Amino acid sequence: DHHPGIPDVSLATTAGMSTNTIVPLAVAAFLLTFCSLAHAADPETCTKDCDIVLTYFEGAGRAEAIRIALFTAGVPFEDKRVAYPVWSASNLKAETPGQALPVLSVDGVVYTQSLAIARWAGKKSSLYPSDDRMAMRCDEVMDIFQEILTKTPQDPDQDKKAELRKVYSEGPMKIKMELANKYASDAGEGFICGPGLTIADLNAWMAVDMIQSGNFDHVPATYIDQFPALKALGGRVAESEVVKSYYASKAK
């Protein structure tokens, strides 16, 4: 569910990104020519024995929480990364279900939508709450940041785009950020759904980092300073053992 105009390709996190494979056109085309579902495994029971392929762009973006959750669960998966210009300028986009990334293939069964995939991965890694009310809060926070991204205004004219985003960041986006900041504040020194890290925190962290690193076009890095609790939460997530272990594994 890539949103055009928001630079997912360059969303490197504060924890640092390792060099990953860029999928060549022919290989990516093969990945996105999906096989029959007739003999596919049940994804609900699938763990270490399944053939799992996550396909997304080169950066962190909307796939990083999924990658971290699968790593934390100890579930082997193929992390396929395709350069956005290659994907958008070729027939790959037309061949992709929903014409958007990420997509997850589990033994040939293809799933779309980053939050649905993140929840599945989160349940396998204990990064998704077992309590139904905490699960609702987790979903809510992920939806907040998803809504912020999907409603971000676009315009081919950069001056007009800058003007639209200024209005957006001072209005609708700020309202959503304030709500997320409240939940981060309520968490104190913990995480949004309690003492343990969840995929909601990972998604919040990615949004904070996108702004802080200057990768949200026409929204200044200092914008995040208005939301101190959310900024502090991002720092705790970046320093968590879950995140540090993931990046340490990528550095090997």
Image: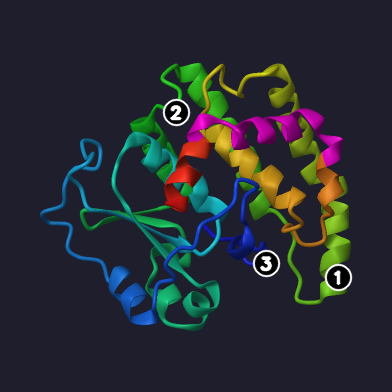
Q: Note whether 97 is above or below 195 in the view shown.
A: below
Measuring from the top left, give residue 191's x and y in whole percent: 61, 23
The amino acid beneath tag 2 is Tyr
Residue drawn at (69%, 51%), measured in percent from left and top?
A: 210
Q: Which residues make up the magenta segment? A: 225-242
Frontmost of labels 2 and 1 is 2
Dominant secondary structure (helix, strand or loop) of the stretch shown in magenta: helix
Q: Where on the picture, by quarter, is residue 174?
A: top right
Q: Which mark is residue 130?
A: none
Q: Which residue is mark 3?
A: 5
Residue contact between numbered discs 1 and 3, judged by CB atoms under 8 Å:
no
Measuring from the top left, give residue 126's x and y in whole percent: 40, 27
159 left or right of 202 in image = right
Q: Which residue is mark 2?
A: 128
Identify which residue, 197 or 123, lies in the foreground.
197
Whether residue 16 is visible here, answered yes or no, is yes
Residue drawn at (31%, 38%), measured in percent from left and top?
A: 74
Whether residue 143 is visible here, answered yes or no, is no
The amino acid beneath tag 1 is Lys
